[in-house]
Amino acid sequence: MTKHAVIFANGEMHIPEAVRKIAQTADLKIAADGGFFYLQQLEMMPDLLIGDLDSVTAEQVSLAEAAGCRVRSYPVDKDETDLELALLAAAEWGCDKITVACALGGRLDQMLANIHLLCLPQLADIDLRIDDGKVEVFLIRNQAEILGDQGDLLSLLPLTPVVCGITTTDLKYPLIGETLVFHQSRGISNVMLKSKALVEIQSGLLLCIHDRKEVLI
């Protein structure tokens, strides 16, 4: 049985009802420091609050503890971001599916770092994606099936210098055993022709950005 963790980062939450729908599928809800605020907005409590806790108040920490939430506190001067700590904690707890909410928007450096965390080797065997209800972002290591609607936008961006042997099915601009390189924009803005698309690669790491026409509500 799949064990699904939903992690709330401290980015932005543009579509609360869509994020609520995602959170309701969780077996484990984790607040990465200031992500606790977004859970409060949805009138939810995390199972774990983790980070250096510089973005939450003492009152919020006490509220979490009173609700039975575990709290893991780390020094402010640390090598990992709060989200990285949360991802590793979810992996330690045996989760085989992780969805990160509220990780897009806000500071550009933080958002890029959040996306790069998809490449953590400790999470290579986990179904890991960032999802705000409108846009989902995930890594393709071998192949991926994308579920959505006809007309959804799909962008494929190399996260390694070269991604080879890319073959797509049911996209408007097909790739057949082709190569995308890190410094070119060829993979931007493809279009799903059906409610399901397939992307396969032979080598490299490929970032998939799926922009839905309809939000998850």
Image (cartoon, rainbow, N blue to C red):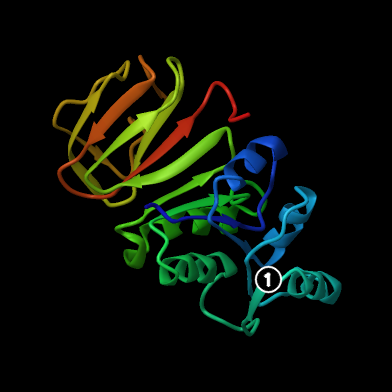
Q: Would residue 76 appear left or right of 157 to someone viewing this image?
A: right
Q: Residue at x 57, y 22 (%)?
A: 214
Q: Residue at x 31, y 59 (%)?
A: 124
Residue 71's spot in the image, x, y percent?
Answer: 66, 77
| Label 1 element class | loop
Question: Which residue ends up furthest to the front in the rendered image?
Answer: 1
Does residue 188 appear in the picture of this structure?
no
Question: Which residue ends up furthest to the right in the rendered image?
Answer: 59
Residue 133's spot in the image, x, y percent?
Answer: 58, 36
Does residue 144 appear in the picture of this structure?
yes
Give the quarter of the figure containing the C terminus.
top right
Residue 47's spot in the image, x, y percent?
Answer: 63, 65
How many circles with numbers are drawn on the protein? 1
Q: Which residue position is annotated with label 1?
A: 69
Classify 209 as above or below 37. Answer: above
Give the quarter of the image for residue 118: bottom left
Classify 210 as above or below 110. Answer: above
Residue 89's spot in the image, x, y percent?
Answer: 49, 71
Number of other residues with Cα within 10 Å of mark 1, as a class: few under 14, some 14 to 19, many 20 or more: some
Q: Would residue 30 appear left or right of 62 to someone viewing this image?
A: left
Give the quarter of the image for residue 178: top left
Q: Residue at x 36, y 15 (%)?
A: 194
Q: Would residue 65 appear left or right of 123 to someone viewing this image?
A: right
Classify 141 as above or below 125. Answer: above
Q: Would residue 6 appear left or right of 137 to someone viewing this image?
A: right
Which of 193 and 43 lies nearest the eye of the viewer? 43
Residue type (three-letter) at the residue carrying disc 1: Cys
Q: Residue at x 42, y 67 (%)?
A: 91
